[in-house]
């Protein structure tokens, strides 16, 4: 582990959600010595039991194992308040998450970090707690839930937050101590759009086809669709004032091809019959394209098809 001057190893953290993202980064903070508790849905809290949580690599070697503190999301009042809350649920739950956290009556000093995909999933939390207390993180990572108690870390771990929030350095220092490449950046919006450039096509196409990323490279039409979607996202970024280089399209296509077969969170959601993160990912960009007057026919088509798939899962 790294020796970091001024490390806040006593940081008190709640991780709201114990899926792949919350479980991985919460366990990393535990490895670094932070005081971490996980907030789960009531039914999940009751079933979590004494099995704890294990992080495995692709060869099923255990990277971390422990029995973290877990609390029910409907019983937060009276608990020792955290300094930092990592929001690691699906963005579709943010309105309910905000309500549950508001009932906890946390001090004004508590900060909230959204570990979620999309253009602006943090808005419900900002409405509840204020702009200054809620911030974003951008992660590039492949980690999957094998079961309620086991996560598989595939790789590509990187973590970015803005350098402006007061606890940003404390968070990235702890993650770095645990071995996660984490850093503060002056322009987090660039990182958000850089990830959208990948998420918008790959999450959508893998979800609609039920296949993994490797299949896209076996289909010239699917690869052409991926490129067309990336071009539309790039054009939106330019009009939104984000100086994302056009070369990033080919770079991301080449990198994804080199990584091999990858599943996406949207594909896993659709296979499990879970609600999709439609608005934060595709809806917000479709709305932005209309406001800016930029035609995005590929994005609009993909969004409509995902919307139909989401309605089918609800039925």
Image (tube, grey):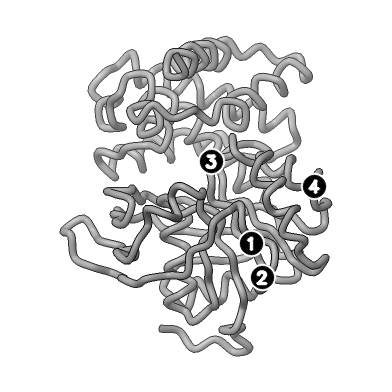
Instruction: From the top left corner, tell me how far across and down residue 228 is, in percent.
Output: 48, 19
Name the residue: 66% across, 52% down.
136
Cα–Cα gap, marks 1 and 3:
15 Å
Cα–Cα gap, marks 4 and 3:
17 Å
Task: Give left or right: position of 41 versus 292.
Answer: left
Cα–Cα gap, marks 3 and 2:
21 Å
Residue 60 picture quarter? bottom left
Task: Give left or right: position of 19 versus 209.
Answer: right
Instruction: From the top left corner, tell me how far across and down residue 61 is, in percent.
Output: 19, 65
Q: Give the crowd class for mark 1: few <14, some 14-19, many >=20 residues within 10 Å.
A: many
- Disc number for residue 82: 2
Q: Count numbered badges in the picture.
A: 4
Secondary element type, mark 4:
helix
Which residue is at the front of the view, 224 or 113? Answer: 113
Secondary element type, mark 3:
loop
What residue does disc 4 label? 128
Which tag, 2 or 4, sits closer to the chain's start?
2
Instruction: Note whether 235 is above or below 262 in the view shown.
Output: above
Quadrant (top left/top right/bottom left/bottom right) for the C terminus: top left
What residue does disc 1 label? 85
Instruction: Note whether 215 is above or below 14 in the view shown.
Output: above
Cα–Cα gap, marks 4 and 1:
14 Å
What residue does disc 3 label? 90
Secondary element type, mark 1:
strand
Which tag, 3 or 2, sits closer to the chain's start?
2
Instruction: From the top left corner, tell me how far across and down residue 159 is, in percent.
Output: 52, 59
């Amino acid at each position: 582990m790294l020796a970091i001057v001024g490390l806040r190893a006593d940081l008190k953290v709640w991780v709201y959600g114990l899926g792949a993202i919350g479980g991985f980064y919460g366990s990393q903070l535990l490895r670094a010595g932070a005081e971490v508790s996980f907030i789960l849905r009531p039914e999940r809290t009751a079933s979590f039991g004494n099995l704890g949580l294990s992080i495995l690599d692709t060869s099923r070697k255990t990277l971390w194992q422990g029995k973290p503190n877990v609390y029910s999301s409907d019983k937060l009042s009276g608990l020792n308040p955290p300094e930092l809350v990592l929001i690691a649920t699906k963005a579709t739950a943010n309105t309910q998450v905000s309500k549950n956290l508001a009932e906890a009556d946390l001090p004004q000093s508590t900060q909230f970090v959204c570990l979620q995909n999309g253009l602006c999933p943090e808005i419900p939390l900002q409405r509840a707690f204020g702009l200054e207390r809620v911030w974003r993180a951008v992660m590039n990572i492949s980690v999957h839930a094998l079961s309620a108690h086991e996560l598989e870390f595939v790789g590509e771990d990187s973590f970015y937050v803005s350098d402006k929030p007061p606890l940003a350095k404390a968070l990235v220092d702890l993650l770095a101590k645990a071995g996660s490449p984490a850093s503060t950046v002056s322009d987090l919006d660039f990182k958000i759009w850089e990830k959208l450039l990948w998420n918008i096509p790959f999450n959508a196409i893998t979800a609609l086809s039920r296949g993994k990323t490797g299949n896209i490279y076996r289909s010239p039409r699917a690869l052409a669709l991926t490129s067309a979607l990336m071009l539309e996202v790039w054009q939106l970024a330019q009009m939104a004032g984000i100086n994302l280089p056009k070369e990033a399209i080919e770079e991301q296509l080449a990198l994804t091809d080199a990584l091999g077969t990858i599943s996406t969170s949207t594909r896993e959601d659709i296979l499990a019959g879970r609600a999709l993160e439609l608005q934060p990912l595709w809806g917000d960009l479709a709305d932005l394209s209309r406001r800016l007057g930029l035609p995005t026919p590929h994005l609009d088509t993909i969004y409509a098809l995902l919307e139909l798939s989401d309605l089918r899962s609800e039925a």
